[in-house]
Amino acid sequence: MDGAAIPSIRSTCPYCGVGCGVLLHPDGQGGLSVSGDPDHPANYGKLCSKGSALGETMGVETRLAAPRVFGAGATWDDALDLIASRFAQTIKDHGPDSVAFYLSGQLLTEDYYLANKLMKGFMGSANVDTNSRLCMASSVAGHKRAFGTDTVPGTYEDLDEADLIVLTGSNLAWCHPILYQRILKARETRGTKIIVIDPRRTATCDVADLHLALDPGADVALFNRLLVEIAARDAINPDFLAHTNGFDAALEAAKSDLAVPTGLSETDIKTFCDMWIDTKRVVTIYSQGVNQSTSGADKVNAILNCHLAAGRIGTPGCGPFSATGQPNAMGGREVGGLANMLACHLDLENEDHRAAVKTYWNAPAVIPDAAGLKAVDMFDAVADGRIKALWVMHTNPAVTMPAADHVRDAIENCPFVVVSDITDQTDTARIADVVLPASGWAEKDGTVTNSDRTMSRQRGVLTAFGQARPDWWHLAEVGKRMGWADAFDYAGPADIFREYAALSQIAGGFNKDFDISCLKDITDEGYDDMAPTRWPVSAAKQGGRFFADGKFFHGDGKAKLLPVTHRAPAAMPTKDAPFVLNTGRNRDQWHTMTRTALSPRLSAHLAEPYLDIHPDDATELGIAAADLIKISSHKGQSILRARITDAMRKGHVFAPIHWTGETAPSGRIDAVIAGHVDPVSGQPETKAMPVAVERFDAAWYGFAVSQKPLRPKVAYWAQARTTAGVRMELAGTTPVADWEAYARALFDLPDADVSSVIDPNRGGVRIVLSLDGKCLAALFTSRTPIAVSRDYLATTLGTAPLPILTGRPPVDQPDPGPVVCSCFNVGLNTILSAIEEQNLLSVDALGMALQAGTNCGSCKPELTDILRSVSVKEAAE
C-alpha cells in the first residue's frame, strides 16, 4: 500500500464527559491528526479547542517507556511480581482493608471493571475509589436517593428541544463547549431561554437571559423557593406525583427555607420562578458548582424535587441533567468504581446483590458488606498508616486532592505505592515505589460512557510507546500472580466487555436500570465495529429516556422527593481568612495538564496560574494587574498572578486547578483547600474555601524563554510549552548579584555566548544566551512585574540574538499578542487590528475575517468583551 492513504479510524475524545466522537488520521510515522466525527451523536463533527489539538499532544518526550521499581528500570515480570507479592503480604499481615486502589475517569470501562473485580471480589476490600469522587459523587447520591439507582433520565436531544435551560454551577462555555454550542443553536433556532446560576460572571453568562449571582452554597434555598412556588401556583403535576413519595415533607422543608438569604433580589428570584414555572420544557443542567459542596447531594435533590413535582422529567426537552467532568466518569459509575457501589449499579449493602456478584465472579473473598474508604478518607488512612499498599491509576492526587500537601506527604510515606500512568513526570509518580507504563489514548482499546449514557469506543491506532501496556492487562497480570489465573484470563478488552455485559443481565433481574445484556454475546468483530450506543441495551428497553412512565427503581417502584434544607458551607470567612475561594477549570487545559500542556497553542491562552479578584478588593490590598498574590489557609498556600476583573463579586476570588509541581509548584491550588466533605456523597467542598489574600512582594520578577524545560529554585515559577521550547514566568525573593552567572546556571549553558543589557540603577536585566549566532535562551528581569512582548519572545529561539534584547518585535514584524482563539491561534493584537482596519462590529464579522470563534465557540464571550471594550474606548474619545 505504498503511497496509499491510511484510512481514518473512529474513536472518542479523552477529555470531558461530553464524549465527542473523533476521526483519527495516522500519518504512518507514529503521529496523527484529529478531526471531529460528523456521525457521532454527541458532537456531529464539532470539537472544542482541546479536542482540536489532540494531535499536538502525542509527543513521547515525557512518556514512560518501561517499568520503574524504586527509581530504577525493571522488567515487567519483576515489577508485576513485586506488586502481587507486596499486596498479598500486606493483606496477609494486616487484613484486606490495609490496601486500596485510587482510580480515574481516564480509565476505560474495561479497566475500571477489572479494578473493581480484583479489589472487591478477590482482595476482599471495598477500598476502591476514584477521582470521580471529586466531581460527580453528589450527583450519584442524589440520583440514588430520588430514583432508587444512579440513572441519568435524559439525553443530549433534550438540549435541542428545551424552551428553557437552567445552568447551575456550570461554566458550560469553557468546561463543556460542545454542549454549550448545542444550546446556542437551540437558542438561535427555537428561541430557547437561558438562565445561569453562578456566584461569578463566567463566559457562559455571555448569552444568558438571566444571571443569578447567588451566594456560594445557597442552591438548596433557591430551588426550595422554586418548589414552594410550584406548589403555590398549581404547577404540580398530580398524575405524575402519584408515582412519587415524600412531596409533603419536601414542601414543608422547602417552606422553612423561605427566609434564608441567597444573595439575590426578590425580583430576580421571582423572574427565575416565573420563567421556570411558565415554561413547560425545562432542562436544569448542573455540574461541579452543585456537586463540589458539603451539601452537594442535598443540592441535587432540591433540583430533582422540582422536576419530579412538576412532572418535567423523561419527556423531550425536560429533566435534570448532570454534566460530568471526565470522559469515563459514567463508565466508572456503571462498573462500581466508587467505594460504595457494586458493578452494574448493584448495591454493596444488599446481601442478595453481593451473593449474585460473588457467584458470578466465582470470587474467593467475602465481598464487603459496607462502603470502603472514599477519596478524602482514603488518603487520611494512608497518612495514619491504615492503608499500607496503594495503587493509583491515571490520576495525580498529590495535586488534585484537597489538602494536597498532606496527601502528597501521605503518599510519600506510604510503605508501598504503585502508579500506572503514561508518564513518570507527575507529582504522584515521582514519589511512587513502582511506576508502570500505561498505553496512552490512541494506543489502547475499550469503551467509555458519556454524560447521556452513550457508550462509545476508544480505538488504538498507534503502536504503544516503548513497553507500555493497557491498564486492564496490568490488573489482570497482578490478579494472575496473586493466584487467580482463571478469573483474570482475558485475551483482550472484548472478553472483559462480554463478561461485564452478562453481569448486567443479573442486575436487570434485580430491577436495576443498567442492563446491556443484549451485548453479552458480541463477537470480537462486533466489538471492534461497535457504534455509539446508549444504554440500556436489553430485551426490555433500548436507549431512550427514563421515567416518563412513572416507573422508578425503589422497592415500591416510586420516586422519592427528599426533604432538604439549606446548610452553609463547612467553613465561613473569618477575620484571618476573609475571602471566599472558588476553584474550577480553564478553557484550554485539562486537569493537571499531563496531556494539554504538550500543546503550545493550548498553553498560550492563559500560560500561568492566576487569581481572579474584584477591582475594589485589589485596590484595598494594594494589588495591581500582573502583581503576584499569595493566598493561604490553615492547610497551605499558593502564589498566583493577579487578574483584576469585575466578573468576581467583592470578597470572592477564583483560581484554576491545573498547575502542578511540574508546571508551577506554588500554583497548586488544592494545597489551600480543606478536606470538608458532603456527609452523604463523600465529595469534598472546593467552591467555598475561606482564605487570606495578600500581595506577594518579590525582590525581582522575570520572564524567560528556553529550548529545554527548567526547574529553577525560586519562590515562583510557571512554565508553558512553546513551538520551540518553553516560556517561563519567575519571581525571586533574594537579590541576584551577578545576573550573567545566574542566567548561565539557570539555563545550564556555561559555554554559551552572552549578550546583555543591565541597568543596575533601575534593576532592568536583558540577557540572551546564544551559540553560533542562534538564541538558545533569554532572560528578562525587573524589580516590578516584567513588561515585554511575551508572545513574540516565545518565537525567537533559534534566531539572531541581538534584536531579542529589546523584548519587542521589530517594527516590520507584527505581534499577534496573547492568544484569544486557541482553535485557530488568533491573538489579541490581530483581533484589535482587524476591528480597526476592517471596521468589524460583531463576533460573526470577526469569525468571517479571522476564523476566531468559528470552531468550538468558547472564545466568543472574550471576543464580545474585546468588541465592547473597543466601543467604550471609542465613545470616550
Image (cartoon, helix red, strand yellow):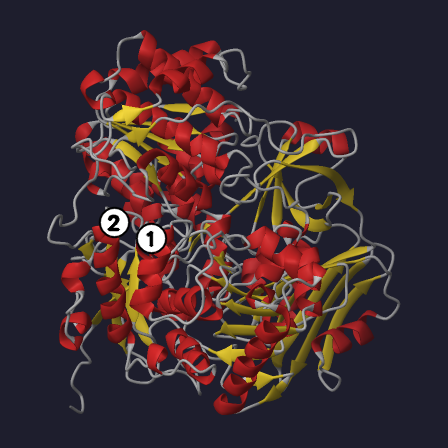
On screen, residue 159 above or below 830: above
On screen, residue 38 above or below 498: above
Identify the residue shown where x is 67% and y is 30%: 572
x then y, percent, for residue 200: 52, 32
Q: Amino acid at mark 2?
A: Phe
Task: Tell whether 488 sits left or right of 794.
Answer: left
Q: Residues within 10 Å of mark 2 (few under 14, many from 20)?
A: some
Task: Tell whether 686 sits left or right of 723.
Answer: right
On screen, residue 567 above or below 626: above
Can residue 208 be seen here? The reply is no
Badge number at residue 510: 2
Task: Tell whether 513 sits left or right of 792.
Answer: left
Residue identified by numbered label 1: 352
Marks 2 and 1 close (CB-CB < 8 Å): yes
Identify the residue shown where x is 60% and y is 52%: 377
Mark positioned earlier in the residue sequence (2 or 1): 1
Quick one: 418 or 500, which is closer to the camera?
Answer: 500
x then y, percent, for residue 291: 47, 40
Q: Quadrant of the N terminus?
A: bottom left
x then y, percent, for residue 46: 26, 53
| Secondary-structure class at tag 2 | loop
